[in-house]
Structure formats: C-alpha cells, structure tokens
C-alpha cells in the first residue's frame, strides 16, 4: 500500500492530471485540497493538492502520469509529487481529511 500526492497550480490542471492517472493505474482518490490565499491584494495562483492510494506500483505509475499531465499546464517548479510507501497506521486517516467531499455510494 502507498499514498501518493500531486500538488500543482490550478484546480483544472489537477483534475486533468488525476483523470489521466486514474486511467493509467488502479488508484483511489482520498481527497482534494486547495490553498486559497486570504489576502487577495497579491496575485497568487490557486494551488491544489490531491491525495490517492493504491498498491505501490500503481501509485508510482499514477504519480508519474499525473506529473506529466500537470506539466502541460504548469512549469516544473509548480508541480510537486511525493509517495509514502507502507505508511504508518493512521496516516491514511490523515490523508482523507479534505475540502472536497466524495460520494462513496457506488
């Protein structure tokens, strides 16, 4: 089991990247968060982060596919990816804390 993260500028770019990642690997999205600046006097682009889980090999594929997709809309310095392999108990619960609520009824 692994948890993957993608952070980039733009909510649309994030959704595009995750669409590609979900089609390339067997992963489950845990949560999506945005970093909204409270002070609107400076132009700061919306930054969004997605957290997802799956087998280590699937998360590795998803991170790379998502990164490449996000780079279509962002520069290298605007895209951050990370993987936590075999997370400690409880980390998955922290990863599920999100601004976006998911409908689990499938």
Image (tube, grey):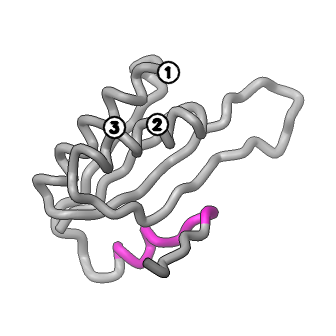
x and y percent of residue 54 in the render?
A: 22, 63
Q: Is residue 98 magenta?
A: yes
**Camera-side residue of 16 and 74:** 16
Q: Which mark is residue 16?
A: 2
Q: Residue at x 21, y 50 (%)?
A: 25
CA–CA distance between discs 2 and 3?
Answer: 8 Å
Q: With respect to residue 46, does 1 lie above or below?
A: below
CA–CA distance between discs 1 and 3?
Answer: 12 Å
- For marks 1 and 3, the one nearer the N-term is 3
- Residue that label 3 marks: 66
Image side of residue 7 versus residue 62, left or right: right
Q: Quadrant of the C terminus?
A: bottom left
- For marks 1 and 2, the one nearer the N-term is 2
x and y percent of residue 23 in the render?
A: 28, 46
Q: Residue at x 39, y 36 (%)?
A: 80
**Camera-side residue of 46 and 18:** 18
**Camera-side residue of 82 and 26:** 26
Q: Residue at x 25, y 52 (%)?
A: 83
CA–CA distance between discs 1 and 2?
Answer: 10 Å
What are the residue bounds of the magenta stretch? Answer: 91-100
Q: Nearer the viewer, mark 1 or mark 2?
A: 2
Q: Which mark is residue 73?
A: 1
Provide the secondary structure element on which disc 3 rests.
helix
Instruction: Determine the image quadrant of residue 90.
Output: bottom left
- Furthest residue toward front: 106
Image side of residue 93 versus residue 14, left or right: left
Provide the secondary structure element on which disc 2 rests.
helix
Q: How many marks?
A: 3
The reply to whether the C-beta atoms of the residues labelled 1 and 2 are less than 8 Å apart is yes
């Amino acid at each position: 089991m692994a948890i993957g993260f993608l952070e980039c500028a733009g909510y649309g770019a994030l959704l595009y990247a995750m669409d590609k990642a979900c089609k390339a690997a067997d992963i489950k999205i845990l949560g999506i968060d945005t970093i909204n600046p409270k002070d609107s006097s400076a132009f700061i682009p919306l930054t969004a982060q997605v957290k997802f889980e799956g087998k280590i090999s699937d998360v590795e594929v998803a991170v790379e596919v998502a990164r490449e997709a996000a780079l279509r809309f962002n520069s290298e310095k605007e895209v951050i990816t990370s993987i936590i392999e075999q997370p400690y108990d409880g980390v998955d619960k922290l990863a599920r804390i999100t601004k976006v609520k998911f409908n689990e009824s499938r």
